[in-house]
Amino acid sequence: MGLEIETVSVRFGGLAALSEVTVSAAEGAITGLIGPNGAGKTTLFNVVTGMQRPNAGTVRLDGRDLRGLSSYRRARLGLGRTFQRLELFGSLTVAENIGVAASIGQRSVVKARTKENKGIREEILDRVGLTSVANERADTLPTGTGRLVELARALATRPKVLLLDEPAAGQDADETERFSGILRDLASDGLAILLVEHDMELVMHVCHTIAVLDYGRIICTGTPAEVRADPEVQAAYLGTVAEAVADA
C-alpha cells in the first residue's frame, strides 16, 4: 500500500508552513516532491516521521494511522529517512553505521541478532557498492560516498517507505548516475520511495509521479511530462526550474 499523507497542515504562529497537503508514495514507485527552498518539503518529512506534530491531517503507513506514534515507533513500523544535511556517525566505520541502523528492526536474541546484523550489513554494502570502504571511518569519506552510506543506513532498518531529503547533494555526475540505478532497483523490489531533490535531471529520470510544493501547498501532481507542461508550475518557478525540467 505504501504511504498516504492526507490534508496535512502545519502552522508556526501565523505562518502556514503546510496547507492541506495530500501526497502518496506507492509500493514499487518513486514519487518526487519538488519545490523551492522554504516550500515546506522538510517540514512535511518531519510530520511523516513524527518529528513535527501537524495541526491537521493524517499520515498512514500501509493503511495504519500513525497519529501519536513516536519517531522510533514509526521507524520500527517501516519508515526510513535520510536528511538534507549529511548525518553520519563520523567516528564509526561504514559497516558500523549500517550495523547500528540494522539493530533497530531486530527482535531476536543477542546471538541470533549478531549473526543477522552481519548478514544485513554485507548484503547492503554489496547492493549500494560500499564493500571497498566498509572499514573506513565515515568522517573520512567524500560527500558523495557519504550520501551512499546514509542511504545504506536507512535501508538497514528494512523500511517499507524510504524518504530521501536531497540525497544527491554533493554527488558528481557519475555518482548521481549510479545512485539513480540504485533507486530504480529498490523500487523494482517493491519499496516505496518519496524523493525530495533539486537535481531536476535526476527527478525527471527516476520518478514515476511528481508533486510540486509551493508556499506550503501542492500546486501540481502528475507524471514528469505533466509537471513539465503545467502553467502554474512554470509561473511559480518564474521559468527557472521549468527550463531546467524541460532540458532534463
Image (spheres, helix red, strand yellow):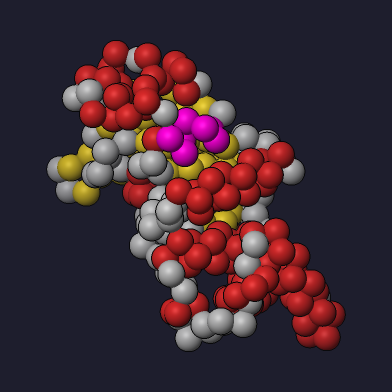
Nearest the camera: 144 or 64? Answer: 144
The answer to whether residue 205 is magenta is yes
Residue 7 part of the magenta-drawn span: no
From this viewpoint, is residue 104 visible?
Answer: no
The x, y position of residue 177, in whole percent, is 53, 46
Location of the C terminus by quadrant is top left
The secondary structure making up most of the magenta span is helix
Return the residue found at the far left. Answer: 14
Q: Residue at x 50, y 21 (%)?
A: 223
Q: Residue furthest right?
A: 112
Q: Is residue 81 visible?
A: yes
Magenta region, residue range? 201-207
What residue is at 29 percent from the left and 24 percent from the top? Answer: 243
Query: Which of the 4 quarters of the picture holds residue 170?
Result: bottom left
- Of 203 and 118, nearer the camera is 203
Displayed quadrant of residue 1: top right
Is residue 169 positioned above or below 113 on the image? above
Q: Please indicate whether residue 96 sits to the left or right of residue 51 in the image.
A: right
Picture coordinates of residue 49, whole percent (x, y) = 48, 54
State the image coordinates of residue 181 (x, y, percent, origin top left): 62, 45
* Residue drawn at (43%, 55%) of the image: 171
The residue under the point 22% across, 19% down is 235
Q: Is residue 145 left or right of residue 134?
A: left
Which quadrant of the figure has residue 100?
bottom right
Looking at the image, is 152 positioned above or below residue 134? above
Total marks drawn? 0
Is 118 rendered above or below residue 79? below
Q: Position of residue 21 (x, y in %)?
A: 39, 32
